Amino acid sequence: MSKDADTVTGLKDEIAELKRRIQELSWDSVFGMWTRTAFLQFCRVMPRGQRTVAFIDLDRIHDLNNQLGYAEVDRRVKAAFSIPLRKSDIVARWYSGDEIVILFDGDQHGALMKIRGLEESAAREGLSFAFEIGTWQVGESDIVDAVNALSTASMEKRGAAKEKHDEPGAR
């Protein structure tokens, strides 16, 4: 083989390796979904319009990790979120592993039906979650702001529910 052919082969190998690394950074193989970075990139190149977004906060993940082990909890989350969604729906880990976002290619009614299916799937795996659904105007606002608003609403709702539960005579 000539020196030029060796160089081309070497460059092709290097490009293939870089593509593999990008895929690893974009795909969370533990949960079987996209990473936050990949999700944000998809949102940057998305055509304008209105999209439905859901913020999901898994319950008791840290307790379950301590009780069942990380590998078992990871398996359960991956199984729970493996229900069929549209190819154009984007599911991604958001922060610490107990928060997930889904960008739906459909209206809120369809998204809510999918969330209900996810709740059933999660329950079969011994998991549960809180969620908030909203809309995002692609190109008019930042997806991070939309997700943060849903996250805040979820936390406020959980806080109100906890306060109500902790009231004297509420049990």
Image (cartoon, helix red, strand yellow):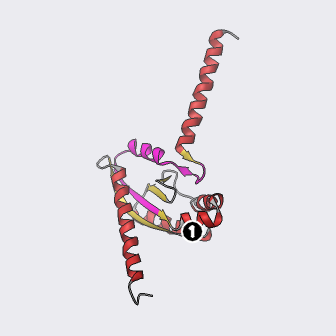
At 56% from the left and 31% from the top, the residue drawn is 18
| Residue 71, image quadrant | bottom right
At 35% from the left and 63% from the top, the residue drawn is 152
At 33% from the left and 53% from the top, the residue drawn is 145
- Magenta extent: 29-56
Can residue 91 be seen? no
Q: Secondary structure at mark 1?
A: loop
Q: How many marks?
A: 1
User: Is residue 162 placed above or below 45 in the rendered structure?
Assistant: below
The image shows residue 95 at horizontal and vertical percentages of: 46, 53
User: Is residue 87 placed above or below 159 in the rendered structure?
Assistant: above
Q: Is residue 120 left or right of residue 163?
A: right
- Front residue of 8/85: it is 8
Q: Is residue 5 left or right of residue 146?
A: right
The image shows residue 171 at horizontal and vertical percentages of: 45, 88
- Front residue of 166/37: it is 166
**For the N terminus, which image quadrant?**
top right
| Residue 168, image quadrant | bottom left
Counting other residues with Cα less than 10 Å from the Cα at mark 1, is it few (<14), some (14-19), or many (20 or more)?
some
Can residue 131 be seen? yes
Q: Is residue 12 magenta?
A: no
The residue that mark 1 highlights is 127
User: Is residue 61 placed above or below 167 in the rendered structure?
Assistant: above
Which kind of residue does numbered mark 1 sit on?
Answer: Leu
The image shows residue 154 at horizontal and vertical percentages of: 39, 66
View extreme (bottom): residue: 169
